[in-house]
């Protein structure tokens, strides 16, 4: 089984690329499902077919589903949300506002992503393709189970017992709503589900994240940040898709400046994501809507290759704790220390080795620190932050 998540900034054509991939996988004989976790679904528009909250067949061996966010939220968070809402209302917060703010940031998409666990465990599909909401923050939220697992093991039992013992006593002195066993059971079940999802998505032989971008400065910057967090949290990124690239056949003077900018940013894309493969999709003369156009995009993007294969294995960069600081390790085979030059501007670190240049966005934990030293170690550049 393969699970492929497509992420990227809003408006880059992520849904079209994900849908084209699904179409090609189904044509190769894989039982394929594509699902959208974005609250503003566009999957149905891409296929030009009505898609609902349950999987429907779109073509032979191809199914589609647009996650019902409200249903997923109620299923995984409803009991806890109801308790939070009662606390806020007890404090005098307006009922409508209490209903909105009782949802934790990112919880809606996390609840939607839990559908992946259900589909994977159903054994009905060979390939699961996920059109994620346009944000890289989801990848940071996916690291939550590591913290939650510790909480569930060490703090949760004592907290639950304390609340059970204190509730009768507290009710004599205050009318504040007290959590019951059902609230604690819901939290426990949610954490366990998130833990299963994290294990599934961090299995690099099964799951990959693919970034879709356009050759534009703001888009590349956000993609760099997403790429950093993919590596930081141990997920695998096996492909970058640069979409809507003007081809050499476009000679109109009107597009000259745009072509020049795209060529410049194309070099930045190479510097930012190498050695992960970078595939391109040209700016097409028709809107990518319907099965025929999706097949066309898939043919351009993958050619004769199987889209479900793992295009790149390993992590180009790694961040590890080192005493009071951190080490950033980056694969730079055949380079010597004398060849390496570092330039830093804020949260951006530029690494030059001869004609090779690599741009990386530092996570917040490193961006606040200073570079102490750098060295080459077994084909890796090791940068110390303190």
Image: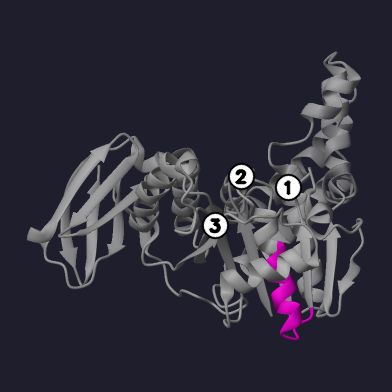
Work out whether residue 117 can be spotted.
no
- The quadrant in which the N terminus is found is bottom right
Callout 1 touching callout 2 (CB < 8 Å): yes
Callout 3 touching callout 1 (CB < 8 Å): no
Foreground label between 3 and 1: 3
Q: What x and y, as percent, mark residue 166?
A: 81, 34
Image height of 347 relative to 88, above or below: below
Q: What x and y, as percent, mark residue 362?
A: 37, 44
Q: Which residues are magenta?
A: 19-31
Mark 1: secondary structure: helix
Residue marked by disc 2: 135
Is 30 magenta? The answer is yes
Q: Residues within 10 Å of mark 2 (few under 14, many from 20)?
A: some
Residue marked by disc 1: 109
Mark 3: secondary structure: strand
- The label number, if any, that marks residue 139 in the structure image: none
Q: Residue furthest top?
A: 92
- The label number, if any, that marks residue 211 in the structure image: 3
Principal secondary structure, stretch drawn in magenta: helix
Residue at 50% from the left image edge and 75% from the top image edge: 311
């Amino acid at each position: 089984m393969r699970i492929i998540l497509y992420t990227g900034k809003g408006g880059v054509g992520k849904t079209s690329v994900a849908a084209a991939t699904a179409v090609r996988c189904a044509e190769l004989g894989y039982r394929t499902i594509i699902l959208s976790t974005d609250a503003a679904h566009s999957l149905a528009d891409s296929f030009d077919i009505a898609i609902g909250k349950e999987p429907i067949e779109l073509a032979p061996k191809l199914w589609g589903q647009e996650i019902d966010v409200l249903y997923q939220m109620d299923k995984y968070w409803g009991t806890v949300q109801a308790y939070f809402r009662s606390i806020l209302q007890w404090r005098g917060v307006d009922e409508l506002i209490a209903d909105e703010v009782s949802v934790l940031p990112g919880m809606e998409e996390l609840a939607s992503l839990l559908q992946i666990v259900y589909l994977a465990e159903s054994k009905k599909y060979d390939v699961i393709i996920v059109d994620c909401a346009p944000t890289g923050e989801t990848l940071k939220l996916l690291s939550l189970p590591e913290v939650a697992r510790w909480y569930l093991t060490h703090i949760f039992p004592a907290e639950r017992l304390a609340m059970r013992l204190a509730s009768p006593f507290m009710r004599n002195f205050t009318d504040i709503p007290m959590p019951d066993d059902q609230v604690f059971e819901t939290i426990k079940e949610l954490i366990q589900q998130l833990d299963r999802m994290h294990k599934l998505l961090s299995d690099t032989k099964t799951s990959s994240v693919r970034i879709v971008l356009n050759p534009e400065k703001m888009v590349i910057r956000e993609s760099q940040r997403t790429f950093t967090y993919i590596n930081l949290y141990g997920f695998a990124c096996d492909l970058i898709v640069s979409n809507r690239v003007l081809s050499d056949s476009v000679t109109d003077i009107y597009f000259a400046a745009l072509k020049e900018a795209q060529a410049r940013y194309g070099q930045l894309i190479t510097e930012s994501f190498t050695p992960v493969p970078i595939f391109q999709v040209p700016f097409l003369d028709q809107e990518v809507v319907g099965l025929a156009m999706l097949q066309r995009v898939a043919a351009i993007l993958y050619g004769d290759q199987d889209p479900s294969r793992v295009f790149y294995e390993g992590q180009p960069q790694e961040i590890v704790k080192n005493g009071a600081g951190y080490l950033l390790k980056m694969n730079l085979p055949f380079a010597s220390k004398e060849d390496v030059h570092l330039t830093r501007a804020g949260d951006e670190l530029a690494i030059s080795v001869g004609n090779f240049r690599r741009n990386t966005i530092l996570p917040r934990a490193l961006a606040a620190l200073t570079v102490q030293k750098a060295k080459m170690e077994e084909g890796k550049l090791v940068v110390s932050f303190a």
